[in-house]
Amino acid sequence: MIAYSTITLAKAENIATLTLNRPEKLNALNETMAAELLDAVTQVEQDSDVRVLIITGAGRAFWAGADVKELFLTGIEQRKRSEESFDIISWLERLCLQLRNLAQPTIAAINGPAVGIGVTLPLQCDIRIASDEARFSMPFVRLGLIPEFGSTYALTRLVGIAKACELIFTGKFIEAKEAKEIGLVNDVVPTADLQKTTFELAKTIAQGAPLAMQMAKKGLYQGLDTAIQSQLRYEDLAFRLLLRSEDHEEGVRAFLDKKQPRFKGK
């Protein structure tokens, strides 16, 4: 485990778990957490032994959004005094792209209420599993702000334009059951089962060939905005490269020998 003050990052069985860890503040985002999140995702990005990343929260909430007083009010007062303030806009863009482009598959394990960035960051994860105690709200317009973290791109692709407008314009809370019904999360499980369910899913994903997983993930997201001809060319290139990989040979031989493959990411 790497030592941070507002988050934790642990690794077990090729799975990294990043936990938001300000439970007394419902894991609200402050400047320290922002810096630590960037560092933690970079650590995962550079660790070839990590095959899946889980993001979850400590305590009864997943993420209560931004620490309004510490992050926003402080920024307002600093700008009024013409002082330098935390560049949250640059941070949002940097972490959003870093998480979306992460080679490893990502799972958001949403253990409780999720507000603001507690909703928008999971949108950039590949899979979202919610506890039955989770609730979701995107109250940006009530703070005079626009939804961030690429959510105006991702949300409509998950729930459709009409539902996205409803969620953003009203900022209302929706329960976990509705979140699943509209496609905001993949599944809802009892709170007591969330950690086990998410880790078992991560273990299943981690058993796949890393190179194939990375190329499949890249192709899936690229395909959101690419013509079929371009995707066919990408698939052709990726398939040719993977045919020459050690993992492909391992997978074929293990299949024929009825054994569990031992992929090395080569």
Image (tube, rainbow, N blue to C red):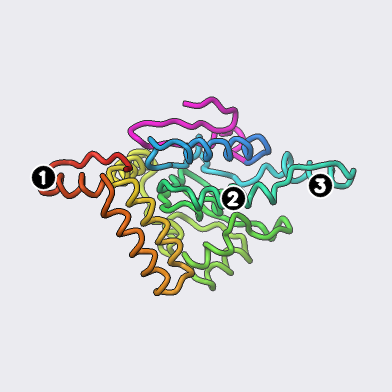
| Circles 2 and 1: CB atoms closer than 8 Å | no
Position in image of residue 178 (x %, y %): 44, 61
Query: 27 or 257, which is in the foreground?
Result: 257
Is 237 displayed left or right of 32 in the figure? left
Mark closest to the chain's N terminus, 1 or 3: 3
Classify residue 231 by image quadrant. bottom left
Q: CA distance from mark 1 to mark 3?
A: 63 Å
Task: Name the secondary structure under disc 1.
Answer: loop
What's drawn in magenta, residue-wise?
1-28
Looking at this view, name the residue that lies furthest to the right. 81
Q: Is residue 46 visible?
A: yes
Label 2: few (<14), some or many (≥20) within 10 Å?
many
Say which residue appears at 78% left-offset and 44% top-offset: 75
State the mark number for residue 122: none
Q: Which residue is mark 1?
A: 258
Amino acid at circle 2: Ile
Q: Is residue 230 magenta?
A: no
Position in image of residue 35 (x %, y %): 63, 37
Q: Which residue is mark 2?
A: 117
Q: CA distance from mark 2 to mark 1?
A: 45 Å
Q: Which residue is mark 3?
A: 76
Task: Name the secondary structure under disc 2.
Answer: helix
Classify residue 5 by image quadrant. top right
Q: Is residue 23 magenta?
A: yes
Closer to us: mark 2 or mark 1?
A: 1
Closer to us: mark 1 or mark 3?
A: 1
Amino acid at circle 3: Ile
Mark closest to the chain's N terminus, 2 or 1: 2
Amino acid at circle 1: Lys
For the C terminus, the quadrant is top left
Position in image of residue 137 (x %, y %): 57, 55
Say which residue appears at 43% left-offset and 52% top-offset: 128
